[in-house]
Image (cartoon, rainbow, N blue to C red):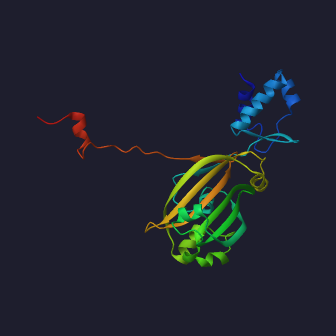
Amino acid sequence: VQVKDILRERIERGEWKPGDQLPSEPELCQMFDVSRIVIRQALKEMTYEGLVVRRKGKGTFVAEPKIRESLVQKLTGFYQDMVDGGHKPVTQVLKQITIPAGSKVAAALHIEVGTPVIEIDRLRYVDGEPIVLVTTYLPYALCPGVLQEDLSQQSLYACLERKYGLFIARGHRTLEAVPANEYEARLLQVDKGAPLVRLESVGYLEDGRPIEYYHALHRGDRSRFEVELIRVREQLNGSDPRARRNGPET
């Protein structure tokens, strides 16, 4: 049995709970009667798997459970998704200003470069821990009053719908893995270069107009995305699928 498997089993049994510090490397070497190289490799693999986190100068700790998010969402927004999942979300608004749209934002929102847009930077906390850094862009002409809204206490989606009649009916999202730069690492309380999941999204109104473009940086050690797939039964030339199984009647 590998050292990693034994450590994993002890964590799963609750012998070490989330946030608990594991024994030091020398203590683990003595506990399992193996070399330090073996212990370091086991801890490295467990870190990649999200079971533990290693903090410079402090040691190795059992990781908190990852926060589940679905990629097939009801488009209620992060705030409501976390509440529905039993978590306590808190939002720190870092920036809420009007700027001229750059080329990428303009392309996403189908507007001319230089058109005024509202930029909102938010740091989202879940159960007291920073989890997501979000930058959102909205066409200023459609919702100018958002500049005065207190978005630390409400869902942006709910605000847009309730106060401006802007219902986000669908969205298109992409995911990629990126390393944290110095600024992102400081806000999300991770090491520079730590893996982040970058979620990019465009939200559309019922008439097809894009209303929201955002990119969100999720901590890789605290986030897990899920997607549910449904297989659609195909038909050949619009025929009844039973005809393909049984062949034509004679």
Q: Position of residue 171 (x, y in %)?
A: 50, 59
Q: Position of residue 215 (x, y in %)?
A: 62, 58
Count of marks, rendered view? 0
Q: Nearer the viewer, residue 188 or 113?
A: 113
Question: The C terminus appears in which quarter of the rendering?
Answer: top left
Residue at 53%, 72% (x, y): give it.
161
Q: Determine whether, in the image, residue 234 is placed left or right of residue 246.
A: right
Q: Nearer the viewer, residue 238 or 18?
A: 238
Q: Within the image, what quadrant is residue 131 found in? A: bottom right
Q: Within the image, what quadrant is residue 246 found in? A: top left
Question: The N terminus appears in which quarter of the rendering?
Answer: top right
Residue at 44%, 66% (x, y): give it.
208
Compared with 171, 31 (above or below) is above
Q: Position of residue 64 (x, y in %)?
A: 73, 46
Q: Nearer the viewer, residue 113 or 116?
A: 113
Q: Nearer the viewer, residue 104 or 174?
A: 104
Compared with 191, 91 (above or below) is below
Q: Position of residue 150 (x, y in %)?
A: 68, 74
Residue at 84%, 25% (x, y): give it.
36
Residue at 66%, 67% (x, y): give it.
120
